[in-house]
Amino acid sequence: MSGYTIEIRTGVNTEDHIAHTWVHVIRPDGSAEAWGFYPDSETGNPYYGDGQIRREDTGQPYTASSGPISMTEEQYHKFTTNLPTYN
C-alpha cells in the first residue's frame, strides 16, 4: 500500500483499558504513529466532558476498526499540524 492511511481503532476490555479509542496513521514508508483520546486529567470522566489527545502505542490490541482510509500528504500534514501533541 502506498500513500498515507488513517484508521480509527477501538479497544474494548483490552490490556489496561475498558474502552479506548485512538487514531492510527501509516506513512508511505510503512512507519506508524497513533494518538489516543483520554479524559481530562482533572475531571477524570471517560464518557463526557473535556478530554486530551496523547501519543499512543501503535502496537496495542484493538477489537474494532474503521479499516484503513486513504489520505493525501496534504491531509496528513493538516491533521498532524492540528494535534496538540505532534511536536
Image (spheres, rainbow, N blue to C red):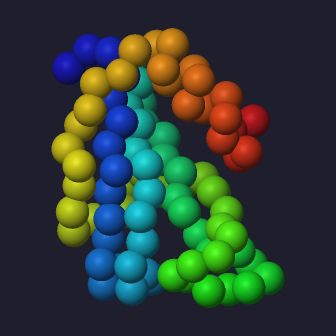
Q: Residue at x 40, y 15 (%)?
A: 72
The reply, left or right, for residue 71 in relation to residue 53 is left
Q: How many marks?
A: 0
Q: Is residue 29 above or below residue 50?
A: above
The reply, left or right, for residue 46 in relation to residue 86 is left
Could you say which quadrant of the image residue 29 lies in?
top left
Q: Residue at x 54, y 63 (%)?
A: 37
Residue 43 image point, x, y percent? 73, 85
Q: Residue at x 39, y 86 (%)?
A: 18
Residue 58 image point, x, y percent? 42, 51
**Which sits in the foreground, 44 or 86?**
44
**Which sits in the foreground, 32 or 71?**
71
Q: Is residue 64 above or below residue 72?
A: below
Q: Residue at x 26, y 32 (%)?
A: 69
**Residue 61 appears in the figure:** no
Report the residue that reaches farthest toward the right. 42
**Residue 73 appears in the figure:** yes
Image quarter where the C terminus lies is top right
The reply, left or right, for residue 78 in relation to residue 31 is right
Image quarter where the N terminus lies is top left
Residue 71 image point, x, y percent? 36, 22
The reply, left or right, for residue 54 in relation to residue 18 is right
Residue 33 image point, x, y percent? 48, 41
